[in-house]
Image (cartoon, rainbow, N blue to C red):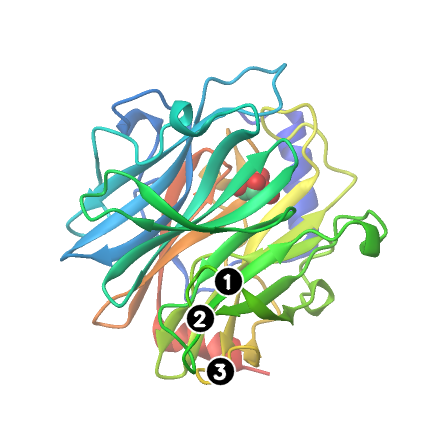
Amino acid sequence: MKGLSTLWTKNILRSYGYRSPSVIKRYENNPVLTAKDIPYEATLIFNAGVVRFRGKYLMAFRDDYNYSIVRTHFHTHIGLAESEDGITWKVLAKPLILYDDVHTEEISRFYDPRLSVIDGQLYMCFAVDTKHGVRGGIAMLKNDLSGIEILSLSVPDNRNMVLFPEKINGLYARLERPMPVYSRGGKEIFDTWISFSPDLKYWGESTLLLPQERVPFSNCKVGPAAPPLKTPYGFLTLFHAVKKDSRLFKNGWEPTWKKVYSAGIMLLDLNDPTKILGICDEPLLFPEAPYELYNGFRNNAIFPCGMVLEDDNEVKIYYGAGDIVTCLATADLDDLVSLCLQK
Ligand code: BMA
């Protein structure tokens, strides 16, 4: 529905002057997964992690359902889908994580799954809302995809964890976005950090990787998006970048939504991923397609959680659009690396 508020928002977005670069191709039949494709209760299907695993593509997606305006949270399952081509998906009959199985007095839900394959083993990072804060989790998936074994849960508040695809100098590595409120003047200005672990359980050597102020198209928070891809040039790494604009008002299902989420891209050093080799000063994916601008739960939210490198150097990027559907965009690896390295 293109009401007055939608036009107002569109004009505000236009005033920023950003467009996704021409090297990015949105899949013509986007979205690739919506609530209609789900064989169980589903309303919002978004923020999906994707990997190539055992000769197929595997997706773990967030399914928010049972919406009520009086509750601050949906109920949430994490579902699984498989694909032969990374475009057409078949949803598995049962969710990987059922809301009822994890919901307790303390835990509200698990959400925003990111998948990684390291040495042939499937892992998932996710966020957990609890009564005492948001925690970032890392788990191993069972061989038959029937459930998970949790390896670590951070102290609150932390989320948006993603794993690097292999050990670096003998250690696992992850990106994460802690939410320091006290030291940032209560302003929701958050940065992207990197930490290391010998076993995916104990994490340390934490270093600031991408400070919010380094990203010209964010005035609010920057955090991990899809898990980094190993390429001959470095770890190709997406991040989400948030802009808050007090001029925005009704912009989705909620009474107000004052943020715009876009995706940025950077290249990290293969031997020392605390070093940014290059970063693009403009967004890689900025909301502009109808399914990003209109009819979302939260319009203008682009949130990638999965990236796959094909043998022909095509990079598939999976992202949540409007916090309601799952979409696909593609680009050539060399073009993405050039964007990171151009001055
Ligand atoms: C973030 C997370 C994401 C969501 C985004 C936009 O803080 O909650 O799951 O997609 O906001 O609403």
The x, y position of residue 17, in whole percent, is 65, 57
Give SS at disc 3: loop
Q: Which label's residue is closer to the chain start, 3 or 2? A: 2
Residue 199 in view, yes or no? yes
The x, y position of residue 185, in whole percent, is 86, 51
Residue marked by disc 3: 269
Q: Nearer the viewer, residue 251 or 105?
A: 105
Camera-nearest label, 3 or 2? 2
Query: In the rendered structure, are the residues bearing label 3 and label 2 in contact, judged by CB atoms less than 8 Å apart?
Result: no
- For the point 44% across and 70% down, which residue is it? 198
Q: Nearer the viewer, residue 269 or 107?
A: 107
Residue marked by disc 2: 198
Marks 3 and 2 sit apart, C-alpha to C-alpha, by 20 Å
Total numbered badges shown on the rendered structure: 3
Q: Residues within 10 Å of mark 2 (few under 14, many from 20)?
A: few
Q: Residues within 10 Å of mark 3 (few under 14, many from 20)?
A: some
The x, y position of residue 337, in whole percent, is 44, 77
Q: Is residue 310 above or below residue 327?
A: below
Q: Nearer the viewer, residue 30 or 139?
A: 139
Residue marked by disc 1: 202
Q: Nearer the viewer, residue 141 or 57?
A: 141
Query: In the rendered structure, are the residues bearing label 2 and label 1 in contact, judged by CB atoms less than 8 Å apart?
Result: yes
Residue 300 in view, yes or no? no
Q: Which label's residue is closer to the chain start, 1 or 3? A: 1
Q: Residues within 10 Å of mark 1 (few under 14, many from 20)?
A: few
